[in-house]
Amino acid sequence: MSFNMIITGIGGQGVVSAGTIIAQAALSDGLRIRNSDATGLAQRGGSVHSQIKIGANVKSTIVHPGTADVILGFEPLEASRYAHLLKPDGIAIVNSKPVLPVTVKNGMMSYPLMDELKQIFDERSLKSIWVDALEACERLGNVRVLNSLMIGYMAAKAKLPIKIETLKETIMANVPKRTIELNLKAFDLGLQQGGEE
Amino acid sequence: MGNNAIARGAIEAGVKVVAGYPGTPSSEILSTIARDARKYGMHVEWSTNEKVAYEVAYGAALSGVRALMTTKHLGINVLSDALLVSAYTGVNGGLVIVTADDIHPFSSQNAEDTRYYAKLAKIPCIEPSNVQEAKDMMLEAFELSEELQLPVLYRVTDRICHAKSDVIQGEIKQSDAKASFTKEDPRYVMIAPNARKRVGWLNKQIEKAAALSENHPENRADYAEQATLGVIASGVPYEHTTEALDVLGLSDRVSVLKLTFTYPLPKQKIAEFLRNHSHVLVAEEIEPIIETDVNSIAHQIGYDALVHGRLDGLVPREHELTPDRIGESIARILSIDDPTVKVPTYKAPKVIRRIPNLCAGCPHAASYYALKLARRKMGGGGAVTGDRGCYNQGTNPPLSAIDTCVCMGASISMASGLNHAGVEGPIVAVIGDSTFLHNGVQPLINAVHNKANITVLILDNGWTGMTGHQPNPNTGINVLGEEAPKVSIEQLVEACGVQHLQVVTPYNVDETVAAIVSAIEHTGPAVVVSRQVCPVQDHRIRRRKGEHLEFPIYTVNTDQCTGCLYCVNNIGCPALDVVDGKVSINPAHCIGCGVCAQICPTQAIKENRQ
């Protein structure tokens, strides 16, 4: 069986980079991968997701509903949107800080309450962990390391078939040089927080 | 990425000339090849539009070298004029057209199945089903093109173009083909008497292609021993099918006929597959093209069972296929004869849709605001015809700035039509710089010649932004990053015969409003060029050069802000947040364009000078 996951969020949060890092790390560990991104309007505040499948016998690039080991949500609404992909013993790890669309800011639409979004997982008897990852990033001084932090958190919580060291090396190879240290710090913080709870 | 794999395949095949026009999901193919252009002595270009690109590649292929043309599906419509005649002359060096179909569609005006064009033009069609195959089949496509002397349609979809997988690379063959042109009357001169001679030739070539398709190793049937159901699948749906069978544990009960060389179809192989199954399901994207032909083969051989697919509704009629959609269809068919087979259903949660917007500080948002004000000043009414580019996001709330979006260049011609029909009020066409050069110049000449009373607003941000910031003839550099002559939009507009032209900076709201008002007041076609380089790309380039960027800092005086949300509702800038009913500016997103400060009714937004 393959290890399947989906990373969800909005344009600019580093969803696709996170997907690339995980896929590349899996490759470095000698595993086969399939990775498919939906980025049509990535730069313009639209929904973005990256699906990753790791294993010897991966075929389609799309995660079949009910087969995802992990949903890694960078934004609550975007995480709940894909709850049906999670398998019964899978886990959703969600950054609980919402990013509001303009149509919510001006009152045209209303953003669901956080409890309603959690409920989407609960009513399907699916496990979800909600963590204020953005606050942790702000403490590190840069919200742009959200993806490294979330990958670290996931590495602690899920049975990822990739070595921690490989993930770190791949992060180093993929982020801008001047932010390597900060990204590794974020990864370690995520790893540590994920291990504590 | 699949697009990288396709690029690699073309380089391995020794391609010499590559031309295209950017379009999601195809764009990365050409830019990937461009990175190696010098190394392997290839000519690579972004052309002004797809027809031009195709003709460049076709011209090159006549000389005996291998040529590649890349486009998204809509570009095939643009180049079809040349395509259908080029099939009559045929080619000498291999000519492959990669068409990347956005079939869902995720970011296109329509969902189109370009495989129809293979049938229409009578050229072979290859449909790889995964990233590895997308690389591997490229060499074969060039060889096939040379063997048949026909252009080959290489049809991929989003799930190949933007999918990533491990890929085994092949060897790069340095081509020793030398370009030479030999006059070959009457082959290249398609006047009617000559064209008549080529009709029969083309039909013979496509018959030869049918024989090749029949024996192609990737048109292959995997028979399951106990199978009553057979699935015929082409392209990405083939991978989805095998995946669905794995997930549902039905692999031993269903046979699969994989089709890769899909025009012409291997009719005998299909006939044999039909005879071996009491049910057949066709899984293809996105129109029932193979399915229709399978039905016709079924009729010819007297197969009396129903062929299932998009036509009888067993496969959803619209949109891309996914493993679960195919799995559901398979289970439904099996459950007809075996009630123990359960039909799975998956319900996606219903949550609000996230509507995309223009980026923070986008000059288009400022132009749209000025346009709105100018139209209001001129009494309202009329229409704003849009075109194709980033600025389409201006159709979403809160801006709701454009009334139409059809295809490249249509903004100007449709505006003319609305004007000639007698629609009252200002008729304004909005078009980007790349789009204007793609197909907007002829409509402008037409508007001048036929005295259309319209305003054309050219949103000039210097890049082909929507598709990932490719350079165009208005950028000043080419795809290789070399300096390239920059076309002058002003001189071009004047040469078209436009009598009223103004160039403005959209970040200056008053100036832009005044220019649009004056253009609307002018009788006859008038043009306003609203020029501001795309900040996303500009900042990216400057950061890469090691520049430290500092932006003017704008803040909201909460005592002065009345919470009217005029700024949020009229420019919809993502940097504007609403906290406790009042506006605040997110410094992580704001680039200091200053437009919100200019439009705030209570002057609550100020630049903080340090």
Image (cartoon, coloured by chain):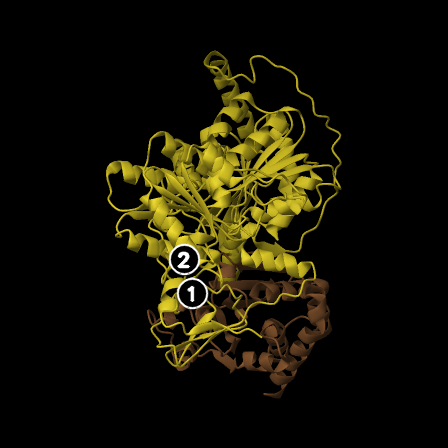
Q: Residue at x 63, y 37 (%)?
A: B18
Quadrant of res B535? bottom right
Q: Position of residue B209 (x, y in %)?
A: 55, 28
Q: Nearer the viewer, residue B217 or B415?
A: B415
Left/right placement of residue B548 relative to residue B107 reads right
Asked whether the residues under marks 2 and 1 belong to the same chain, the reply is: yes
Question: Which numbered disc covers residue B598?
Answer: 1
Q: Nearer the viewer, residue B462 or B299?
A: B462
- From what the image shows, is residue B15 above or below residue B463? above
The residue indicated by pointer 2 is: B510
Colour chain A appears in = brown
User: In the image, residue B268 lies at what x, y percent?
Assistant: 50, 33
Query: Does the rendering let one see residue B330?
Result: no
Instruction: Label 1, secondary structure: give it.
Output: helix
Query: Where B205 falls versus B372 (above or below)?
Result: above
Give the residue type that dot 1 points to.
Gln
Q: CA distance from mark 2 to mark 1?
A: 9 Å
Chain drawn in yellow: B
Quarter of the rendering occupied by the N terminus of chain A = bottom right
Contact (Cβ within 8 Å) of mark 2 with mark 1: yes
